Image (cartoon, rainbow, N blue to C red):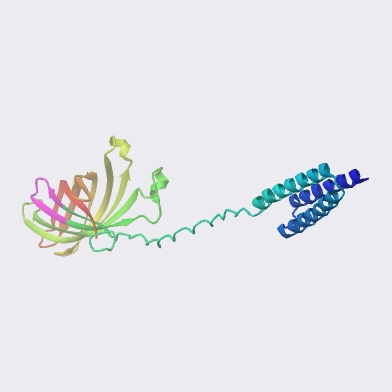
Amino acid sequence: MKRIFGILLVVAFAVTVAGVAFGRTLEEEKTAVRDYLSVLDGKIVKARQAGQTAKVKSLQADKAGTLRRWEKLQAEMTVTPVVVPPPAAPAPRPAAKPPVVATPGLFGLGWNTDVSLGYLAGKSLVTGRGDLILDDPLGLGSIVGLSSKAVNYRLGLAGFSGNDQHDRAMKGIAVCFDGVLNLPADMLGGVESYVGGGLNYTVYRSGSYGGQIFAGLKGDIGLGSKSFVELAYGAVRSNGSTPLHSAKGVGITVGQTIVL
């Protein structure tokens, strides 16, 4: 009977230890071990009084083992947990500065213009011209299989001075309007080219009509924008005196594009 009682005590202690694995608190464990040690102390006293030396030694060994297990369990349960600091918040990014958009052109207007000088061969007629270059709002270039920006227009003023067909002095200022078709660069091995034609009307030295057709090349030669050279056939007229002054023939023009 005593043996069975001892087995029950051991089983009770095992259940107590198992309870730790299932979430028993440290205070509960202390209470259970204290109660078990009290039971063992009572049995040791009774065994001594009865002169059961062997039993006393067995109970004392059981008590010592219980104390060792309790100390080990207490050390495991009181280990200071490692506190993992929360990740540091990322430093705030500096506010992105809006990109500085360069204003195109000399005066920030973004207007495409060109200036040119020309010479009408054989007539000693020198011309100077300034134009505003206008985009084509109709996209006519796409009609002939080119880009929608292949066509543009030139509207400007041209001054001329020299000799007419009869070697008489003539001069004047004309309003000019041209249509320009920019050809694909691969037509001339990567060189940009264009053709076009237009009308002029002399507004200084009396009004008379003239016209011009031309073909040209353009490219960057290091002047900051594109330069061009044109070969043209044209005519200008003025009524400075009677008969009408007129000069026509083949001419050459060189010029420079400028963004205002």
Magenta stretch bounds: 117-128
Residue 125, position as x, y percentages in the image:
10, 52
Q: Residue at x 38, y 47 (%)?
A: 141
Nearest the viewer among 82 and 240 is 82
Instruction: Report the residue that reaches farthest toward the right.
Output: 1
Residue at 74% in and 52% down: 20
Judge by depth and name the residue closer to the eye, 129 or 165. 129
Q: Is residue 55 above or below residue 74?
A: above
Q: Nearest the camera: 32 or 88?
A: 32
Q: Report x, y in % for residue 120.
A: 13, 48
Q: Quadrant of the N terminus?
A: top right
Q: How many marks?
A: 0
- Residue 179 is left or right of residue 208, and the answer is right
Front-most of 205 and 57?
Answer: 57
Where is residue 104? Give x, y as percent. Answer: 28, 59
Q: Viewed as shown, does residue 104 lie left or right of 25?
A: left
At horizontal 31% and vertical 36% (from top left) the residue drawn is: 187
Any magenta on residue 123?
A: yes
The answer to whether residue 227 is left or right of residue 1 is left
Where residue 232 appears, as percent x and y from the top left, is 20, 46
Image quadrant where one finds the C terminus: bottom left
Residue furthest to the top in view is 189
Task: Tell me, yes or no, whether the highlighted magenta stretch contains residue 169.
Answer: no
Q: To which quarter of the image does residue 189 belong?
A: top left
Look at the magenta stretch and give its main secondary structure: strand
Quadrant hosting residue 24 = bottom right
